[in-house]
Image (cartoon, rainbow, N blue to C red):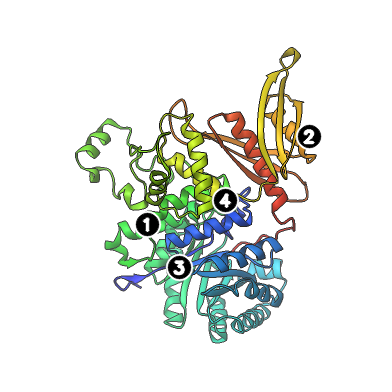
Amino acid sequence: MKNSKNSIVKIFDTTLRDGEQSPGASMNIEEKIQIALQLQKLNVDIIEAGFAAASEGDFEAISQISKEIDKSTICSLARALPQDIKKAALAIKSAKQQRIHTFIATSEIHMKYKLNMSAQKVIQKAIEAVSYAKEFVDDVEFSCEDAGRSEMNFLKEIIDAVIQAGATTINIPDTVGYRMPHEMGYMISELNKFIKNRATISVHCHNDLGLAVANSLESIQNGARQVECTINGLGERAGNAALEEIVMSLKTRSDIFQVDTNINTKEIYPTSKLVASITGISPQPNKAVVGKNAFAHESGIHQDGVLKHTQTYEIMSAKDIGLEDAKTIVLGKLSGRAAFKDKIKFLGYSLNDDELNLAFERFKALADKKREIFDDDIRAIIAEVITQIPEVYKLINLQLSDCMNGVPNSAITISIDGEEKTDAGIGKGTIDAIFKTIDRISNIEGHLEDYKVSSVTKGKDALAKVIVKVTFDDSKPPVIGHGLSIDTMIASAKAYIGALNSYVYINKQKNIKVSL
């Protein structure tokens, strides 16, 4: 099927649900709320805020997001089980636009080995799930898990049944990233002829063979009018279809697709940066659209061409995704609150008074140490401020030295609920000494799983950004901590303490991981 000109493709963002299933990408409630607010600025149609039955933490996050978001539809995932569906309904009850997304596996291999159910039993469960969800909301999405490996006649049978039960969106996931684009296109074309206008067809493509975006685009060409995707392509295994790549493909090649989305593309880059900062998973440098090299030209021939006319080697504008010229440096240590507030507004952020005061305080502290303040420095400060959780532990002072025989030693003062405590410790290296001393002070031992350090911008006085992944309890998932400072060691200490605060703050119930 060819597209009708200018029809709308709905963007269903699942960064907070499927994206969080990327190893090490777990987020606390405050971080999820900030991403949801940014997704609303991006103008996504549906935000899948989580899987309410997975844990009390997920339930609470969905509930809080439902109260904060007033434009995008808020959706919770639910297995085809009454208790899951009821939990989802309770979690989204405060949302202005609500959706329940229920699913069951439809491939022979899943029905036989995972569900141990007959095909007719699966259809019965699907009907019951959709019917029960309709008691709570009008907008019900049904997913055929592992549809990419499901038999077409059975897909039609179960889809017909759930539409009659009240499903308004039918999602066709390529759960294991198995299908080729022409196969995905054929499947959607056949289902589009069968479903007609009875429900919206959605696709949810995984990237195991690097084809998630291609499969999503081919599905759009053949009638899909909703695409499920994530910021930066996050997701378990090889990830999901990347929102930014789908949206900019549709925009750049509108001559082929002749469809629109509701996305505010100027918020793509800020959203990518925020998600990368919170999850600690940055796009690879050559990542399409949002990678740091996406608009970089090293070849002399390319540079010459771009200087003469940008379209010689650029098929889209960096400004279209919200990437401003990094040379617009207007802030320094003499800048006042008004200029800082204006810069924040220019970058697309909206802070309350407390957040503004804290961000300005950190900006002034940085400006005293750094000659030039870049936009990315400001973005890093704001990301740190708006995702901040209650600080049980706060770094007051850090001193480093070598003991006898050159053994690294750290002396650290930490405020614990307002009471300062100082201790010292040694380690195999400087970082080890810092983290062991924090363990001694907090009386909570952590195991470092990952440590990343990068510069936010350029120059000898660049702001160091440290991200750590730490396990404090072997029975619980690791947590992420972030630290910013001109001094890498201070940034490291802040990151570790940030992880410690997240561990204290985050709900400790075991999560149930699912994939569509």
Q: Earlier in the sequence, mark 1 or mark 3?
A: 3
Residue that appears at 72% across and 22% down: 409
Q: Residue furthest bottom?
A: 164
Q: CA distance from mark 2 to mark 1?
A: 47 Å
Of the two numbered discs 2 and 4 on the same chain, state the one appearing first in sequence. Answer: 4
- The local secondary structure at tag 3 comes to loop
Mark 1: amino acid: Thr
Dot 4 or dot 3: first in sequence order is: 3
Q: Element under label 4? A: loop
Q: Is residue 11 found left or right of 401 in the rendered image?
A: left
Q: Spatial distance from mark 4 to mark 3, Cα to Cα?
A: 23 Å
Q: Are marks 1 and 4 in contact (CB under 8 Å)?
A: no
Q: Name the residue beneath numbered marker 3.
A: 45
Q: Nearer the viewer, mark 2 or mark 1?
A: 2
Could you tell me which residue is drawn at 71 percent across and 63 percent down? 56
- Residue occupied by mark 1: 265
Number of residues whose C-alpha sits closer than 10 Å to that of mark 2, classed few (under 14), some (14–19) or many (20 or more): some
Picture quadrant where residue 29 is located: bottom right
Spot occupied by residue 49 in the image (x, y as percentages of width and height): 57, 64
Q: Nearer the viewer, mark 3 or mark 2?
A: 2
Helix, strand or loop at mark 2: helix
Where is the N terminus found, in terms of image quarters? bottom left
Identify residue type, mark 4: Thr
Instruction: Identify residue for label 2.
Output: 440
Mark closer to the chain start, 3 or 2: 3
Residue 387's label in the rendered image is 4
In the rendered image, which quarter is residue 236 located in?
A: bottom right
Secondary structure category for the residue under label 1: helix
The amino acid type found where label 3 is placed reads Asp
